[in-house]
Image (tube, rainbow, N blue to C red):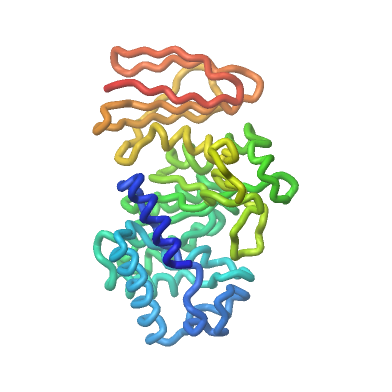
Amino acid sequence: DSQMIIEILQDAKKINPELTLVGSPWSPPAWFKAEGNIRGLDETNTLRNETHFYVGYAEYLALAASTFAKAGLHLDYMTLQNEPLNTPKYPGMYLTAINEAKLAKLVRARLPATTKLLAYDHNWDHPEYPVTAIRNAGGAFAGIAWHCYAGDMAPAQEVLYAAYPDLETHFVECTGSYPDGVCDITRGMEGFGWNHEWDMTNVLLGSVGHWAQSGVKWIVATDENCGPRSKPVGNLRPFVSIPSNTTSEMDVKWNQDFYSMAHMSRFILPGSRRLTTTATGKDSVGIIESFIDTAGKTVTLVVVNKDHTADMPITVTDGAKEIRYLVPAWGTVVLQWDL
């Protein structure tokens, strides 16, 4: 399926040439691993601990990056192991922070400078992992990659910022699931309020207030059976569900994740910068962040009202400009004006 993946990415780049690409390996080939199995299995089935295996795998990853580049798909970022503390029954690999640092130095020496390495690529519950990996990698890492499935966003990301304020912070994976643990693409909008609020708080808007420079929801698209898939999890909710008998856009199911992401991606364009936003007045339950896009000459304010019973009146001042708006209970508003 490698050629199919490349062709899909090429199509995506034609639609949006500015698309950022991140490479994230799930497992080395089996012969690189201690138990000779591509699946995660346990903590002993890690990268074989001989120097030539580390060097060989570094060359393997660099070759993968160059293969994508020759197809017109330059990798802007790479991680070294998807979820390195996970030992799944599907392809994966346990990798300690020290060994990730060891591998990072070898990979960094073989990649072009325009491909940046991100440490960790796992959940908020172990911020000590990226701290250790970065400390021992001799400057190989340009930043940190986070997942959402365990731990708390704000304290974890603040730990990394306190230790390495000059490194990038990226949120690279989070997915929801259909209700009751069952794949049912007719239910992708159920629980919209709760799911949207969680995503805006932790993945999209709230994480920006804790130094994140990106936010990603995984998965983009699946069919009516939540597939095709290689891992044994069949109820993950994508942006869109496209039944195999689809004949028009009317057959596509647009899920909560799509609309939540659109609150950010439609308005906060690449190159935008977060502004310091000061809220005064009555205490409110909400998230407020603003962004400036100097290329597009706009300022954008995003407000999430986390009060589920009361509206939130806001007055926005920006120099001589003033905007008054009533954000409804459980509501999200995006306000944008010209510089």
Residue at 48 percent of width and 26 percent of height:
303
Q: Nearer the viewer, residue 282 or 119?
A: 119
Residue 56 in the image, given as x and y percentages of width and height: 37, 82
Residue 253 appears left or right of 335: right
Residue at 33 percent of width and 69 percent of height:
67
Residue 48 appears left or right of 163: right
Q: Is residue 47 above or below residue 24?
A: below
Residue 6 appears left or right of 89: left
Q: Is residue 255 visible?
A: no
Residue at 52 percent of width and 28 percent of height:
304
Looking at the rendered image, the quarter that the C terminus falls into is: top left
Residue 5 in the image, given as x and y percentages of width and height: 44, 61
Q: Is residue 328 above or below residue 177?
A: above
- The quadrant in which residue 60 appears is bottom left
Q: Nearer the viewer, residue 272 or 2?
A: 2
Residue 318 in the image, given as x and y percentages of width and height: 33, 18
Q: Nearer the viewer, residue 45 or 125?
A: 45
- The quadrant in which residue 252 appears is top right
Residue 268 in the image, given as x and y percentages of width and height: 38, 35
Q: Is residue 121 above or below residue 298?
A: below
Residue at 44 percent of width and 56 percent of height:
145
